[in-house]
Amino acid sequence: MAERLARLSSERAVVIFGGSNCFMCHAVKTLFSELGVSWAVHELDKDPDGKDIERALARMVGRSPPVPAVFIGGKLVGPTDQVMSLHLAGKLVPLLRQAGALWL
C-alpha cells in the first residue's frame, strides 16, 4: 500500500486525498482552484482500496480521519489546518511554485 500511496501522491504537483462528501476537502479544493492550481483528487470512498489508503494516511498524518490529506511536490503537507496555516503565513504560494503547481 505504501508503494501505491507514494505513486498516487506524486502523480501531479498537488494531490488531495479526500472523500466525495467531505466539506473540508471541498474547502481545500476551492482554495487551490482560486489560486489557479490544478490538482488531482483521490476520493477514498470511491476507491476499492480506500480504507487501506485511509489507514496508511492516518498513520502519516497522525489522526483519523486523515482527510483531506494534501501532498505538494510528492510530500505530505497535511490536512486542512496545515494547508490554511501555510496560506495565512504566506508560505503556501512559494511552496506551490517550487513544486511547479504555479507559474506566476
Image (cartoon, rainbow, N blue to C red):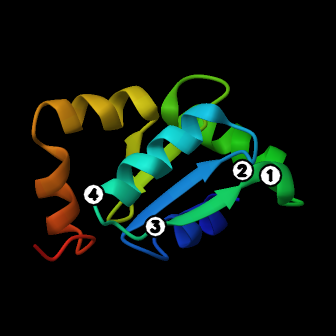
Q: Residue at x 72, y 50 (%)?
A: 53
- Residue indicated by mark 4: 35
Which label number is shown at residue 50?
1
Q: Earlier in the sequence, mark 3 or mark 2?
A: 3
- Which of disc 1 and disc 4 is earlier in sequence? 4
Alpha carbon separation for disc pair 4 and 1? 28 Å
- Let me know if residue 74 appears in the view: yes
Task: Identify the mark at residue 66; answer none if there is no mark.
Answer: none
CB within 8 Å, label 1 to label 3: no
Picture coordinates of residue 7, whole percent (x, y): 55, 72
Q: Which of the two discs, 2 and 4, labels the residue nearer the N terminus?
A: 4
Find residue 88 and report its horizontal and vertical position in percent: 18, 31
Q: Amino acid at mark 2?
A: Ile
Q: Is residue 80 above or below residue 26?
A: above
**Three-letter code for the amino acid on which mark 1 is drawn:** Gly
Question: Residue drawn at (75%, 40%), measured in percent from left and top?
Answer: 21
